[in-house]
Image (tube, coloured by chain):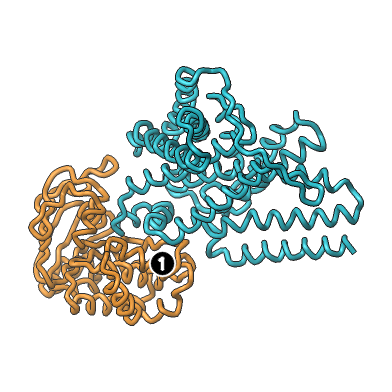
Amino acid sequence: MLPVLGFTLLGVTIVLIVLLFKFKVQLTLHTAGQIAYTPLMFILAVLALNYLLVGLEADRIYFLQQTVYGISLGSVYALIALGYTMVYGIVRLINFAHGEIYMLGAYAGFFAVTSMGLHFVLALIFAMAAAALAGVLVERIAYKPLRNAPRLAVLITAIGMSLLLQNVGQKVFGSIPRSFPRQFDGLYQIGGINLDQSRIIIFLITFLLMLALQYFVNYTKPGRAMRAVSQDRDAAQLMGINVERTISSTFAIGSMLAGAAGILVAIVFPQIRPTMGLMPGLKAFVAAVIGGIGIIPGAVIGGLLLGVSENLVTAYLSSSWRDAIAFGMLIVILLVKPSGILGRNVREKV
Amino acid sequence: MLKITDLHVHYGGIHALKGVSLSVEEGQIVSLIGANGAGKSTCLNTISSLVPASSGQIIFMENDITKSAPHSIVKSRLIQVPEGRKVFPQMSVAENLEMGAYVRTDKREVKADRERVLNMFPRLRERERQLAGTLSGGEQQMLAIARGIMAKPRILLLDEPSMGLAPILVQEIFSIIREINAQGTTILLVEQNAHMALSIANYGYVLETGRVVLEGPATELAANDEIRSAYLGA
């Protein structure tokens, strides 16, 4: 009985995914499309796998537990990856300083909670605002003067900016890790799976932010301007769009999401340090490439896929394989479909 | 309405415009003709400020717009329909039209204009929900012009609207240009198809390697022997 249910659910998931691809009106390049759908689809797929596993009498609780952890890690990757992908869509730049914006978000949240004694929700908003400001400043100071420079020069600048922020962070915040005060202690059990409150909150906030982003990109004027600039910058200017302002708002929004990711991670892994942005930054970049760089829903799919794979590998193989699987996936996708899961082969504009 | 004096442009290491002067009077259709690479598109792009002028002056409605940002030029309702259509491929036809009205705040009138434009191009109405990138070349050209009209232009700069289109479509596009002009929009038209361009224009300029070599009322230019042999194939 249960395997049948499993297969049915799997079938439904596949049909949904096919439908999404069929209506790629929204899904393909540079649109927010069904960003918020993808996590739901993921849960459905996991449920399907669950019933299959039950049928096969495997240890499904353990599997599900690890997957749940994977999804919450993955949604953090997704939040960071969205910033990479949006910025790439607009200025064709991999903003390697993005991981540091995430770090700054975590610190902003830390000080908001400790020094200012703010409530978590306010701290979240503060962290997002601080990260947005930092992102816009980085763009103004480091990237804007290089607007017409070769892309390689800007890329190197981005790496330099990343190192600079890490080191300034160590100078200012100290290199000793700080521990983020515990925010949520709740623990629930659903069907034998442990769900801690903080992971539920990560998932919920990520989901809400993605819905907001979807609305913003598709239905607001600045969101439309963003898509227009990413599709054809000259034409966008001829519509009267202020390209510089659009670039700034893209950096602001991408950074905001990274800032949120920073504080969200800190409630589960409370150790924050100035170099914390390095690995998640790289992983989120990998996630963005896996999903298809420049494609907003791609970042979400890539992030979740990466988070879940990492956790399952840790659970079933060994934690030393964790990073290997992430970068292994990058190599495979670059070999098999360099434009990413949702990517199409677009011609490179000269 | 639009007056350009001694415009010089250096573009990618090339002295693309070498002192171009031209003027467009309100209500007219003015054609700028010339061979490939004569600097026609550069001229339009400099007016729209996509390409910076090295020297010279561009006056629109008594304002010097030579150094204005592209988006503020659009706000003064000087609108360009660029060469090669440049519609937003991943947006629907409807969204492309909305982008045309990006700087406008008079929502009710935008809606009315949208109807007017869709009546002008019934084929676009049929394809309203379709992605612009999936339209045929002719339809994309219509969309590009329609999008330009959505900005409620005082003057519309059209860059090679006939490029790559079948002769029957070229006829259609030109009669639409005439109609837009009849409804009160001034037009500066850049064309390689000199015959068509001169047939609807009041006045014409001939551009050759970055210089205006001839100008005059369109009918006179069309009758000029040099033009006939060089551009009209007669």
Q: Which chain is home to disc 1? A: B
Q: Horizontally, is A60 left or right of B219 in the view?
A: right
Q: Quadrant of residue A148?
A: top left
Q: Quadrant of residue A18?
A: bottom right
Query: Which residue is painted at 25% across and 43% down in the image?
Result: B14
Q: Residues within 10 Å of mark 1 (few under 14, many from 20)?
A: some
Q: Which residue is mark 1?
A: B95
A31 or B188: which is nearer to us? Answer: A31
B60 or A268: which is nearer to us? Answer: A268
Q: Is residue B124 above or below residue A193?
A: below
Residue A16, percent from left and from top: 68, 64
Q: Is residue A330 visible?
A: yes
Residue B32, percent from left and from top: 19, 63
The local secondary structure at tag 1 comes to helix
Give the chain coloured cyan. Answer: A
Q: Which quarter of the rendered picture does the N terminus of chain B lie within? A: bottom left
Query: Which residue is painted at 26% across and 79% down in the image?
Result: B175
Residue A209, percent from left and from top: 52, 50
A341 or A73: which is nearer to us? Answer: A73
Query: Which residue is painted at 57% across and 27% down in the image?
Result: A272
Q: Which quarter of the rendered picture does the C terminus of chain B lie within? A: bottom left
Q: Is residue B43 visible?
A: no
Rendered shade, chain B: orange
Q: Horizontally, is A274 left or right of B1 in the view?
A: right
Q: Please, what is the three-letter code of the amino acid marked with disc 1?
A: Glu
Q: Is residue B195 above or below residue A189?
A: below
